Image (cartoon, coloured by chain):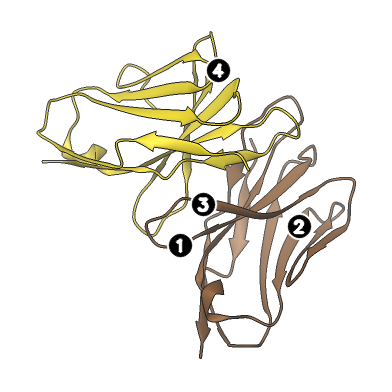
Chain colours: A yellow, B brown
Amino acid sequence: GAVVSQHPSWVICKSGTSVKIECRSLDFQATTMFWYRQFPKQSLMLMATSNEGSKATYEQGVEKDKFLINHASLTLSTLTVTSAHPEDSSFYICSARVDKPGTQYFGPGTRLLVL
Amino acid sequence: GENVEQHPSTLSVQEGDSAVIKCTYSDSASNYFPWYKQELGKRPQLIIDIRSNVGEKKDQRIAVTLNKTAKHFSLHITETQPEDSAVYFCAARPNSSASKIIFGSGTRLSIRP
């Protein structure tokens, strides 16, 4: 089956620093990847759609200058949380879409704690 | 945009009994409806999906039904087992050109021994 990895699995950082999270599709190419945020006991909230070779499409209310997304290759998308603050602490999960039949497979998630 | 509602938010059933989770969607153009299972602290795992040209799909103890007219779909788990305990999310893909999916709010399923 399709495997998606994410790195790091958890990170603790000081307020004001930037954090980069990587999402990789290991055994397939993904022209489209997605970034979600999940707060405890809540659903997955789509932040943005990442398209290889083009700019990401952000959902309403998500600050594109704060959450920088780069999808430079067919197997790698990165999310950078810039100037992180405690309210950015959350579980960030990526998913990669298999073009046919369009199924999404999720990474294991990255738990971010901003002190 | 698409809106997906899911009920109930929590569900407790006796081991061996059946569990049913229901979802409704708002966009009649939605054509793909996956269901994900998420165990605590882990990634969502696709357990079954259904497309709009099919009314029902079954995979062992899991089945999904879709009513396009009413815009609702349901997950049925029969002969529940302790390992079925998890949070289940339904989702809908608004249309064939947009690849994103919109999730429901989730159902926490507990199986009582």
Q: Are marks 2 and 4 in contact (CB under 8 Å)?
A: no
Judge if badges 1 and 2 mark residues of a common chain: yes
The residue indicated by pointer 2 is B72
CA neighbours of label 3 inside 10 A, class few (<14), some (14 to 19), many (20+): many
What amino acid does circle 3 point to?
Answer: Pro
Q: Between label 2 and label 4, give the one nearer the viewer.
A: 4
Q: Between label 3 and label 2, give the one nearer the viewer.
A: 3
Q: Are marks 4 and 3 in contact (CB under 8 Å)?
A: no
CA neighbours of label 4 inside 10 A, class few (<14), some (14 to 19), many (20+): some
Residue at x 66% of width, y 87% of height? B17
On the picture, is A9 further left or further right than B58?
left
* Residue A60 seen in render: no
What amino acid does circle 4 point to?
Answer: Leu
Q: Between label 4 and label 3, give the one nearer the viewer.
A: 4
Picture quarter containing residue B76?
Answer: bottom right
**Badge 3: chain ID:** B
Q: CA distance from mark 2 to mark 4?
A: 35 Å
On the picture, is A21 further left or further right than B30?
left
First in sequence, mark 1 or 3: give its number: 1
**Badge 1: chain ID:** B
Picture quarter containing residue A104?
Answer: top right
Q: Are marks 1 and 4 in contact (CB under 8 Å)?
A: no
Judge if badges 1 and 4 mark residues of a common chain: no
Foreground of the two, A103 or B89: A103
The residue indicated by pointer 4 is A74
User: Does B90 appear above or below B81?
Assistant: above
